[in-house]
Amino acid sequence: MIATLVFAPLFALQAAGEAAVAIKNDNPETWTVEYPRLIQPFVADYRRCLTVTNRTIAGKADLEAQHQTDITRCAAVKAKSIAQSNAMLDGAKTTMSPEEVDRLFDNIGKIHVARGRDLDQQFLSRMAGADAASTAYEAGKPKGLVIELRDASVVKARTDASAAAAAAAEASKDKP
């Protein structure tokens, strides 16, 4: 029953050969990528080329730059995907102009770079938070060795109070 509910929309989309597929950025005002399902394999090839790579985490915010280099590294895949998409759309029921196809693949690249920028911003935010927490800790911790000196009256009062509580506890144990 649950499997039917989960997979039913996927099967319906698969049955419709030219249904539109949309990939939206977190901020829909920035980019929306919509294309006919007919060219999905070419879009997937380009996106796979962009994402399947080794990332270097070096303790600095450079993921946007790494994502930007993916654009140049995948330029040949992008050109091939654009050409294949235009060929596939030639004579199809749902069409996109060559300019729209170019814009589609440009937007996919922009979204990819924006993801790297977002990761950099998250990294910088966490580093700033860790720095602020460290600074607050350093400002609040005692400096040097702290010895608490108490006079004899404070010690005697605490001893008397604890002795009375211990005697009361002992007396309550003896009673049935």
Image (spheres, helix red, strand yellow):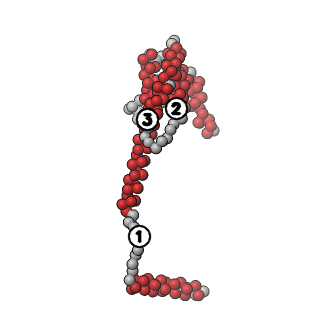
Which element is circle 1 on? Answer: loop
State if disc 2 and disc 1 touch (CB < 8 Å): no
Which element is circle 2 on? Answer: helix
Left or right: 125 in relation to 16: left
Name the amino acid, label 2. Thr
Name the amino acid, label 1. Leu
Question: In the rendering, at what x and y percent does residue 23 appear?
Answer: 48, 30
State if disc 1 and disc 3 touch (CB < 8 Å): no
**Circle 1 is placed at which residue position?**
145
Which element is circle 3 on? Answer: helix
Question: In the rendering, at what x and y percent does residue 10 appear?
Answer: 58, 30
Q: Is residue 53 above or below residue 168?
A: above
Q: Mark 3 or mark 2: which is in front?
A: 3
Gap between marks 3 and 1, in whole Å?
A: 46 Å
Query: Considering only order in the chain, which callout, 1 or 3, is on the residue closer to the N terminus?
Result: 3
State if disc 2 and disc 3 touch (CB < 8 Å): no
Give the residue drawn at x 56%, y 27%.
Answer: 13
Name the amino acid, label 3. Glu
Give the residue drawn at x 48%, y 86%.
Answer: 164
Q: Mark 3 or mark 1: which is in front?
A: 1
**Circle 3 is placed at which residue position?**
64
Toward the front, the furthest residue is 144
Gap between marks 1 and 2, in whole Å?
A: 53 Å
Task: Report the front residue among 96 and 132.
Answer: 132
Give the residue drawn at x 52%, y 87%.
Answer: 167
Task: Report the front residue among 116 and 20.
Answer: 116
**Circle 2 is placed at which residue position?**
51
Q: Mark 2: few, some, or many residues within 10 Å (few <14, many ≥20)?
A: few
